[in-house]
Amino acid sequence: MALSLREKAIIEILINEKRPVRIYEIAEKLNVSQRTIRYDLDEIDYALKNVDECIVRKPRVGILLETQCTLEELVEKCGDNYTNMPYLNKNERYIYLGMHFLTTDDFTSSEQLATMLGVSRSAIMSDIKEISQRAVDKYNVQILAKKGYGYRVQGNEQLLRRWMSDLVYEALLLKRQGEKIHPVSEGISTLVNSYDVSDIRRAVKSSRRVDAFWLPYDEYLKVIAIIKTTFYRVEKHKYLKEDLFEGKEYIKLRTYPIAKEIVKQLAVREFPELEINFLAYELLASNMKFPDNSSKLVDPKLIDTVDEMMNFLQKHEQWSNDSITTLKKDLLFHFEVTLEKIQLNIPNNNPLLDEIKKTYFVEYVRASELLDIFKKRYNIDFTDDEIGFITMYLVKNRGKQDVRIQKNIIIVCGSGRGASRLLATRIINNISNINIHSIVAVFEIEEKTMNYENIDLVISTVPLKDIKLPWIRVSPLITDNELGLISKKLFNQKEDQEELKYVTANDKEYLNKESEFAHLIGMILIELGITLSSLEDNGLIKKDKLLQWGLTLHIVMAVPRWKLGQFNIEPDLDKAKKEQPLIFSEIKKVLGVIRDKYDLIISEDEVIPIMRYLL
């Protein structure tokens, strides 16, 4: 079996010392835990016994390697055929293992896989367990285990191709970053060398003569991966089932002529019609963008629906006729493609969704209202991704408006006039479509000396009594969370929001005690650091100084929120629980300890942003 890089380092230490070495000494030299060294020694012991060498363990004395061989001779005896193979992290091993399983019909043993990737048998066993779960969860593909034979993949051809194209895409990303894809197996070598990327690029460029599409930057490599995978499977006689598109006329897809031209440019022999249809289907799913064809006939129902959406928009905002015309044109074209994808069960993912929600919250709410009209007309549901796309069209065309209806607000401040103006500036710079009617003192609004007509919201830094207008209390140095809450109240988000209790210098003494607050953050970082060190020692997370700095900054900024019990809802919560259950569990556990020890309010959603710095 192959020895991992760390196992080779341990053997080198034992050979050079020529005396019994304690486990803690090895751990200190390699900067890992003693438990990790014990696991590695078990693997080394297993490898050496197969070549008539052995490690001697002397209780309370240390570890001794009795051999006359050099490190290079031991490595060669253990059968390390890939000593030039660089260290691979978990994600890279996942790519290699996946590509190997998908390019061979034979069973492969764990020892063969360990030798192939130059890691320990225990590491491979852990990888196989993880990759098997991922394959089932994401692609509904199984990795079968047969005692005495090893492992092989089994699944529907369409799903196997989805997995393969994702892996090819990941491999292309690695190559773009300057990494070499090593031909560690015959199947991987054939896949990597099949259909040169430059040839595929030329075929794609040629197909643009058929229809002048364009691809977002992030999607271009995905399309290359899809094409490479499709042609590789056909060359290997791995065909799709004939009933895949039964009852559906895929030849009518707009991407069909494009797929046909690509096949014409690349195929060296006859290419099945079913495969052309499938390639057209996959190209449509890749978010190809097409120029508008104004002469094309549009479904009257779709025109009526978009007209109703435009009428709704004009009732709530003042848009110029030119803006409405261009927005309507954009939406008609967009919905034509979207309806086609829905009919074919093709997901329409929006990679900018989170950023859109944060940056254009007001427009996102309006887009959601517009899509409610579409839902009722067509009796279909849309994901948040689709709301994000409509938001982008609103933002794109909003610059062409003449005048927009504004929300009127009053600011009530207990501080000086300068602080009031600072608060007003922060609100104007961060929330669009509002007008500050006036900045007033507390007594003016409580004594009802103001004209409240056409006022949508009162924003105050102090508590207000007996006020009938909608109002919200904020801190004098208004936070991002408070700005978001103002947007929700102004633009009619459905859920009701309660008034938040904010920490001020008068309310919470600890904020003025800088040393106490710094000590609290320091203790929290220590608690979290102990858990992260353990996860790192076991190879579950990566060590990256820049990301660690980002995580530290995140914790420093998060502690005040945890004092207030404020947090964002994380849409990836359930996904993270399934994909990384151990890491999720450990971080959740330590956050629970921090919560109880320091009297904080921490939701399990807070686990997710921490994980993003680790994986």
Image: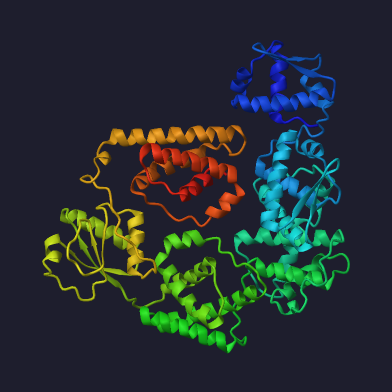
In the shown orientation, is residue 166 left or right of residue 475?
A: right
The answer to whether 287 is drawn above or below residue 473 in the figure is below
Q: Return the x and y of residue 375 as percentages of the image width and height.
A: 52, 78
**For the point 44% across and 49% down, which residue is it?**
603
Tell me if I can see residue 230 in this picture: yes
Q: Position of residue 262 (x, y in %)?
A: 77, 68
Colour scheme:
rainbow
Query: In the rendered view, would you say 129 is above or below 520?
Result: below
Is 164 placed above or below 298 here? above
Q: Quadrant of the N terminus?
A: top right
The answer to which of 372 and 307 lies nearer the viewer is 372
Which residue is drawn at the image coordinates 72% and 54% (left, top)? Answer: 168
Please indicate, yes or no, whether residue 318 appears anywhere in the rendered image.
no
- The quarter of the picture where the C terminus appears is top right
Q: Could you say which quadrant of the image residue 3 lies in?
A: top right
Q: Is residue 226 left or right of residue 28?
A: right
Query: Residue at 80% of width from left, 22% of height from top?
Result: 74
Q: Residue 525, position in %: x, y?
A: 43, 35
Foreground pick, 452 / 265: 452
**Percent x, y of residue 291:** 60, 76
As displayed, is residue 394 above or below residue 78?
Answer: below
